[in-house]
Amino acid sequence: MAADTTDTAAGAATGGDTLAHIEAGLDALETSTEPESGRLRQVAASVLPPIVVLALIVAVWQLLYAAKIWPDWKLPGPSEVFSSLKDTFSGGDAWGAVGHSIGHGAVGFGASVALGTPLGILVGRYKAVRSGLGPILSGLQSLPSVAWVPPALMFFGPTPAMLYTVVLLGAVPSIAVGVMSGLDQVPPIYLRVGHNIGARGLASVRHVLLPAALPGYLAGLRQGWAFAWRSLLASEIIVQSASLGHSLGFLLKNSQDANDMSGAFAAIVLILAVGVAVNQLLFAPLERRVLKARGLA
């Protein structure tokens, strides 16, 4: 009998040790930090592919230029575009143009977020509102933003208000639709749980709906920025005015008027660089952080 008791105690101790080892392993998994070499590999994996693709594009471009299929004034070589870009920076035109466009884009996008977020929540939460406004938002999202430039110009004149109006009309529908899509993916049980613990009305939106819909909301914000940037550049290219400042669209339109293809390509490179930088430095890290926090990355 004593031997059985001893065996039972030994088995319990062994089982306890096993459970302790398992718990320690789980704790280690939760608290383990990613090694520096792993982070460097992740950065290299995200940076190298675009660089390789860009190098291939430049190589194909150089081959087409060397083949002389088109004259130089129609298709300048990469070196000519680089020289034009260098001259734009050395002359001080590039920094001012980039600053004006980014400033207008940031203000317009911020206003679009402030309007599009509550609009998306309103449409996503109430079926009657959704049945009326949902199709209109989808239609506005598919409408080319350049179509808003003429009426905005006639209404406001060549002023910053005209730019911001076009940006709002281009970005707000995309952000609102993104919020709606995110809300559609929230399981109904989340709302019931929130209701049971006292989260009702605005508290339910703030503490339950928006956190649960965050991945879809971020996707809508990224798309909204893309629409805002495109809308802004369309306005800057079409409308030229001293009150709008020296912008990237102004640089591109000036190159067209001067029949300067190298300058046009240089302006396009700047526009593309701003768009890629905002996406890679702002939206991509946010999206990775949210997905990693939810165990999706």
Image (cartoon, helix red, strand yellow):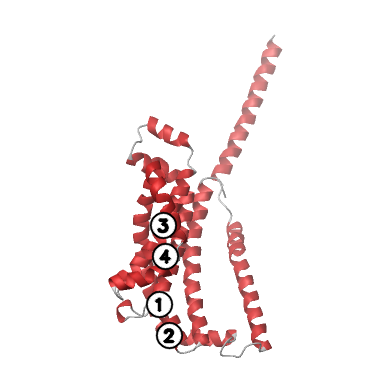
Residue topped by disc 1: 238
Q: Which of marks 2 and 4 is nearer the N terminus?
A: 4
Q: What residue type is labelled 1?
A: Ile
Q: Earlier in the sequence, mark 1 or mark 2?
A: 1
> Across the whole image, how many numbered discs are drawn on residues?
4
Q: Earlier in the sequence, mark 4 or mark 1?
A: 4
Query: Residue at position x 47%, y 74% from top?
Result: 271
Give the Cα distance between marks 1 and 3: 22 Å
Residue topped by disc 3: 173
Q: Earlier in the sequence, mark 2 or mark 3?
A: 3
Q: Quadrant of the N terminus?
A: top right
Give the Cα distance between marks 2 and 4: 22 Å
Query: Residue at position x 47%, y 85% from top?
Result: 256
Give the Cα distance between marks 3 and 4: 11 Å
Name the front one of labels 2 and 3. 3
Circle on res. 228 = 4
Give the Cα distance between marks 2 and 3: 31 Å
Residue topped by disc 2: 254
Give the SS element for disc 2: helix
Query: Residue at position x 38%, y 68% from top?
Result: 148
